[in-house]
Image: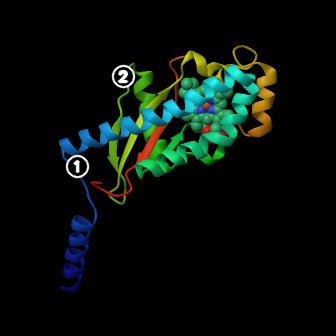
Amino acid sequence: MTNRLTFFSLLFILLTGCQTSLSDKEVAAYIEKGSLISKSTGKELSGTLTSKMKSGGISEAVEFCNTAALPLTQQMADQHEVLIKRTSLKTRNPLNKPTDNELAILKEFQADLDKGISLEPRIKLDQNGIPNYYAPILIEKKCLNCHGTLGQELSRPVDSIIRSYYPNDMATGYSEGDLRGIWSIAFSKPNQ
Ligand code: HEC
């Protein structure tokens, strides 16, 4: 009897305390919100990156990424009251290392890309019922100076600058169209 009671009270807490699914409408709304946030953050990052490349060359641009990429992302996160992260199977900055949930998504996206399936943003509820937005980040031509193949698009001098900031850099050897990583956005308050 006590066991059954405990079971039902646990079930009740699970069902009421923690969201377990979202309606199609909610999913669509989170996709829209996530896409807006990731696009505007991406624009901030690449806009400043491009102007740094023009004014100070690649080394200044690397320095910008090193000092400003995370604070800038944090600023956008505060503004939208969400958590924003860019992560990858091969990270440059160890602070961007994927969580188990992110790792699973990265592997799913990579498998889909390998099969030629086009990658679309998706929403998943985490263990705490928090909706998370995940979207692919693909390599474009302009990324190759810093993420391409060593000795080709990625020159040795640039690689050594990058290595001086990131001794454990794994984020090289990419080609155009490769999956570089994902946007991972957590809507910390459900239904906000
Ligand atoms: C000027 C060099 C440079 C260029 C060009 C560049 N990146 Fe990066 N990228 C970096 C650096 C440096 C970091 C580490 C930033 C940090 O410390 O958070 C980084 C980090 C990242 C991360 C975060 C995950 C990780 O590995 O730490 C992603 C995703 C990423 N870059 C994607 C891209 C994409 C996509 C492009 C092209 C649109 C691009 N980058 C162009 C230098 C560059």
Figure quadrant of the C terminus: bottom left
Write down which quadrant ligand 1 falls in: top right
Above or below 185: residue 153: above
Residue position for label 1: 22
Q: Nearer the viewer, residue 150 or 6?
A: 150
> Which part of the image, by quadrant, shows the N terminus?
bottom left
Residue at horizontal 27 percent and vertical 54 percent from the top = 191
Q: Does label 1 point to a residue whose CB lies under 8 Å from ligand 1?
A: no
User: Whole-percent x and y of residue 92?
Assistant: 65, 37
With respect to residue 83, does 114 lie above or below? above
Q: Position of residue 78 (x, y in %)?
A: 47, 52
- Label 1, secondary structure: give it: loop
Residue flagged by tag 1: what amino acid is it?
Leu
Which secondary structure lies at badge 2?
Answer: loop
Q: Amino acid at mark 2?
A: Ser
Q: Position of residue 148 (x, y in %)?
A: 65, 20
Coloring scheme used: rainbow
Query: Would residue 138 be seen by someone viewing this image from the given angle?
Result: yes
Answer yes or no: is residue 90 visible: no
When the figure is inspected, residue 144 is found, relative to residue 48, above or below; the finding is above
**Residue 48's quadrant in the figure?**
top right
Q: CA distance from mark 1 to mark 2?
A: 23 Å
The residue that label 2 is drawn on is 118
Q: Residue sitting at 80 percent across and 21 percent down? A: 156
In the foreground, 166 or 41: 41
Residue 174 in picture, x, y percent from top left = 60, 22
Q: Earlier in the sequence, mark 1 or mark 2?
A: 1
The residue at the point 37 percent across, 51 percent down is 187
Q: Quadrant of residue 54?
A: top right
Left or right of 150, for residue 109: left
